[in-house]
Amino acid sequence: KGVSAGAAGVGGSPKNRGRRGLCSGGMRAEEKARRVVTISRSHTIVPTYECFNRCTYCNFRMDRGESPVLTVEEASEIFRDLVEKGEGDEVLILSGEVHPKSRRRVQWLDHIIKLCEKAMEFGLLPHTNAGPLSYEEMKRLGEVNASMGLMLEQITPSLTKTVHKFAPSKDPSLRIEQLRMAGKLQIPFTTGILLGIGETPEDRVESLEMIATIAREYGHIQECIIQPFSSGDRDKWQHSMDPSAAFETSQLPALVQKARQILPENVAVQIPPNLVSSGEGGANLLLDCIQAGASDLGGVSPLDEVNPTYPFPKFEDLHNLLDTQGFQLEHRLCVHESRTEMLKGMEGREEIHSLVEKRLARLH
């Protein structure tokens, strides 16, 4: 089974959408479009690893006072280097969370906004994931981001008694609220589910159905990540994990297929290639997921800050692997082309929209 037409409609090549008739070799245009898989060139920066949440599976967080703070000057050097080398279209700004009631919260948000603005000065598109935000915080960030993101993870409240017991911002109702808030603000958005943290198969389906419902309501969700938990060097959970909580990666293609059936056609199913293709048989698993309906590989950065144990494959290696099976790997921006209209005409977003249009012109 090829990649679904709906998934390719957002994650795939926009120039192939809506065409009819036959292509070379007798293949219909829409069939050819289904075989496009997209990826974005990204570079991740971390303003701070400090986080008040204590998810037991986390390989990212640090306690207050342990984490260095990335200065605007340091970030500028990174951006300058990216531009000079022609590496990357966007910057993923991935931050630990300062407590909403902390006196340092305003300073934390202002710093992230300054980093976004600095990235834009270098012609790079910011995409921020900084955890749950207030409406005003999200609105401010929306003015300096081409797109934003937040994993839903799982909506079952049972995890608040286990892996999320000491992680207040992982409250499912809060995360659902965030997806709706982004929709009301018309911010192109990425979300997804995390697998193997104690949820049941039914929980996974319900979480996907929630994403689908919100996506249909607002139209802003552009991709849904299907991410298996992958143990690392720093998580504290893996050594005492209940075997029944694990997710067998062999189940991934079937879940991808289920996600493709549940989600709206204009929401791409994304799989992280560094987590899926690592290990023995990983290449075949990646291809099976694409055959099942995945059409996007996300933003590939020099380092996966959340899963640092798992390096990203090189673009050339992914391209060659997919090419052997007739799939075409294409670059995209963090904001999918079908969602750029959300930025147009919105008060406060004129500059980011103009920058997106320039980047799109270069991409084509």
Image (tube, grey):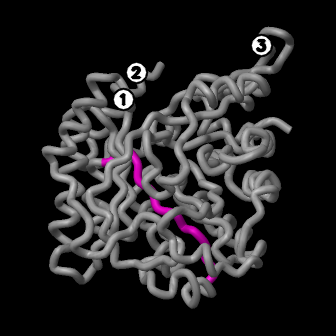
Q: Height in image: 165 above or below 259? A: below
Give the mark nearest the N terminus, 1 or 3. 3
Circles 2 and 1 in contact, beta carbons < 8 Å:
yes
Given residues 314 and 309, the one toward you in this image is 309
Residue reaching furthest to the bottom: 161
Residue at horizontal 54 percent and vertical 67 percent from the top: 152
Q: Height in image: 198 above or below 319? A: below
Q: Mark 1 points at which residue?
A: 357
Work out how far the residue at label 3 is from the one at label 2, CA to CA, in angstroms. Answer: 25 Å
Circles 3 and 2 in contact, beta carbons < 8 Å:
no
Residue 102, horizontal then vertical, whole percent: 21, 81
Give the mark nearest the N terminus, 3 or 2. 3
Main secondary structure found in the magenta portion: loop
Which class describes the residues within 10 Å of circle 3: few (<14), some (14-19), or many (20+)? Answer: few
Q: Name the residue under label 2.
A: 361
Magenta part of the chain: 145-156
Circles 1 and 3 in contact, beta carbons < 8 Å:
no
Label 1: element kind: helix
Residue 202, horizontal then vertical, whole percent: 77, 75
Which mark, by number, is residue 23? 3
Q: Name the residue type under label 1.
A: Glu
Q: Name the residue type under label 3.
A: Cys
User: Does the magenta portion include 213?
Assistant: no
Residue at horizontal 58 percent and vertical 24 percent from the top: 316
Residue 349, horizontal then vertical, whole percent: 28, 45
Q: Name the residue type under label 2.
A: Ala
Residue 181, by quadrant, is bottom left
Which mark, by number, is residue 234? none
Q: Is 235 displayed left or right of 254 in the figure?
A: left
